C-alpha cells in the first residue's frame, strides 16, 4: 500500500502515519516528492487491508494499493527519477551520465591513463573492476583492495567519481569505503544476501540485469535493495542470453521504454557487455540514448589487445572520443544534455 500525504501535510502528520504503519506490522518508507510525500507500507501482502484505516488520519489524502509485486521501485510511488551519485552529480535528470573505463583495474599506469582519457572525452564517471566475477576460476580475478586504492588514486588525479563491482556481502563495507557507486554484476543480480547487504549502505547501487532475468525479476532485485532502506538504485541493461551467437549477448534496448513505464529508477545501458565487440558499441550507445537511456557504461582500455579481461569489447581512447562527439548529437536530438 502507499499512503499519499496531502501537499500541506506537516512532519507531525507524517510521523503519526509512520508510527501507525509500524503498529500495524508494516515497514514505512518515506519517499519525498516535489509537491507531496508518499509513504510506502511494505510487508506481508496478506491482511494489508488493515492499512486502509490510515485514510482517516490527519494529513492523509488517500491509501492506495500498489498492484505490482515490486512496490518501492514502482512508478506508482514516485514519478521523478533523479538519483544523486555525489554532491554534484546525479543520474535520471536531463543530463546523460557516461561511466567509462577498463573492465579490470590492472595497474596504476593503466587506470590513470584510462581515467584521464575518458575524462578528456567527456565521461562524468570512471568504471573499473577490482573484484572480478569470472566464469573461469583460472582467469584474472582482479587486484582486489589494491585495485580500489588505484581507483581512488585515479579519482584524486582526475576528479572523476568511480563505480566498481562488489561480489559478496563480506566485502561490501570495504568497497563502499572507497567507491562512489557500487555495481552488482549480472552474475550476482539474484544473490539476495548481497542485495540485502547493499540495501543497508548509503552509497548508490548500479544493479545489472541478470543474463536470463525477466524485467519483473530485475525489478524485484531492485526491490530487495530498496526494501532494506537504500532507495538509490540505478538499473543497468547489459544484454541477455538468447539463441543468437553473433554477439556475446543480445542487448535488450526495448527494456528501456518498458522499464520507463514501470519504474522511476534511472536506466543505464552497457553496450560493451551487451555486444561483446567494440565495433558494435558506438551504434548501440547512440540507439540507447535515442531510446531514452539515462546513462551509459562503456569499457575503454588504453591497450585493448593486452587487456586482462574483455579486450575485444573495449574501445581505444581515440574511438571513445569519437563516440562521445557523435553521442552529443543524439543527446541533443533526444532533448538531453551530455
Ligand atoms: C563488468 O562490468 O565488467 C561485468 C563483469 O559486467 P556484467 O556483470 O554485466 O557481466
Ligand atoms: Mn567487463
Image (tube, rainbow, N blue to C red):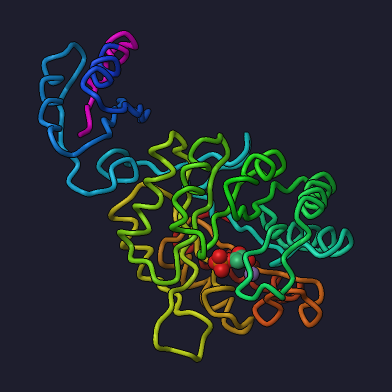
Q: Position of residue 148 (x, y in %)?
A: 76, 50
Residue 12 sits inside the magenta stretch: yes
Q: Nearer the viewer, residue 191 or 35?
A: 191
Query: Can residue 298 be seen?
Result: no
How many numbered marks have been drawn onto this rendered protein structure? 0
Question: Where is the C terminus found, in terms of image quarters?
Answer: bottom right
Left or right, 267 with respect to 296, comes to left
Question: Where is the N terminus found, in terms of image quarters?
Answer: top left
Q: Position of residue 25 (x, y in %)?
A: 24, 24
Is 188 placed above or below 40 here?
below
Left or right, 298 with respect to 259, comes to right
Left or right, 33 with respect to 316, comes to left
Which quadrant of the figure has residue 324? bottom right
Q: What residue appears at the point 39 percent right and 71 percent down from the top-left corner?
A: 212
Q: Nearer the viewer, residue 329 or 132?
A: 132
Q: What residue appears at the point 23 percent right and 16 percent down from the top-left corner?
A: 20
Is 72 placed above or below 305 here?
above
Q: Which residues are magenta?
A: 1-15
Amino acid at each position: 500500500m502507499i499512503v499519499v500525504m496531502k501537499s500541506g501535510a506537516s512532519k507531525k502528520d507524517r510521523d503519526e502515519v509512520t508510527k501507525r504503519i509500524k503498529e500495524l506490522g508494516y515497514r514505512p518508507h518515506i519517499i519525498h516528492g516535489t509537491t507531496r510525500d508518499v509513504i510506502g507500507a511494505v510487508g506481508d501482502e496478506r491482511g494489508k487491508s488493515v492499512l486502509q484505516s490510515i485514510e482517516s488520519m490527519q494529513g492523509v489524502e488517500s491509501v492506495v494499493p500498489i498492484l505490482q509485486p515490486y512496490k518501492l521501485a514502482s512508478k506508482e510511488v514516485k514519478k521523478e527519477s533523479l538519483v544523486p551519485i555525489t554532491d554534484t552529480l546525479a543520474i535520471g535528470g536531463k543530463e546523460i551520465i557516461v561511466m567509462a573505463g577498463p573492465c579490470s583495474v590492472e595497474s596504476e599506469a593503466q587506470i590513470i591513463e584510462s581515467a584521464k582519457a575518458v575524462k578528456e572525452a567527456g565521461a562524468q564517471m570512471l568504471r573499473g573492476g577490482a573484484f572480478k566475477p569470472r566464469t573461469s576460476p583460472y582467469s584474472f580475478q582482479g587486484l582486489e583492495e589494491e585495485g580500489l586504492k588505484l581507483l581512488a588514486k585515479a579519482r584524486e588525479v582526475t576528479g572523476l567519481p568511480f563505480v566498481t563491482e562488489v561480489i559478496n556481502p563480506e566485502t561490501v563495507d570495504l568497497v563502499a569505503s572507497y567507491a562512489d557507486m557500487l555495481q552488482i554484476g549480472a552474475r550476482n543480480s539474484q544473490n539476495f544476501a548481497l542485495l540485502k547487504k547493499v540495501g543497508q549502505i548509503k552509497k548508490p547501487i548500479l544493479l545489472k540485469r541478470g543474463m536470463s532475468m525477466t524485467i519483473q525479476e530485475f525489478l524485484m532485485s531492485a526491490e530487495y535493495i530498496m526494501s532494506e532502506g537504500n532507495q538509490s538504485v540505478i538499473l543497468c541493461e547489459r544484454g541477455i542470453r538468447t539463441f543468437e551467437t553473433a554477439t556475446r549477448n543480445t542487448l535488450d534496448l526495448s527494456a528501456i521504454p518498458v522499464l520507463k513505464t514501470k519504474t522511476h529508477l534511472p536506466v543505464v545501458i552497457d553496450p560493451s557487455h551487451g555486444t561483446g565487440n567494440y565495433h558494435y558499441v558506438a551504434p548501440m550507445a547512440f540507439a540507447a540514448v535515442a531510446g531514452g537511456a539515462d546513462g551509459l557504461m562503456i569499457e575503454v582500455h588504453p591497450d585493448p589487445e593486452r587487456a586482462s579481461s574483455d579486450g575485444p569489447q573495449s574501445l581505444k581512447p581515440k574511438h571513445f572520443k569519437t563516440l562521445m562527439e557523435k553521442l552529443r548529437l543524439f543527446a541533443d536530438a533526444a532533448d538531453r544534455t551530455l
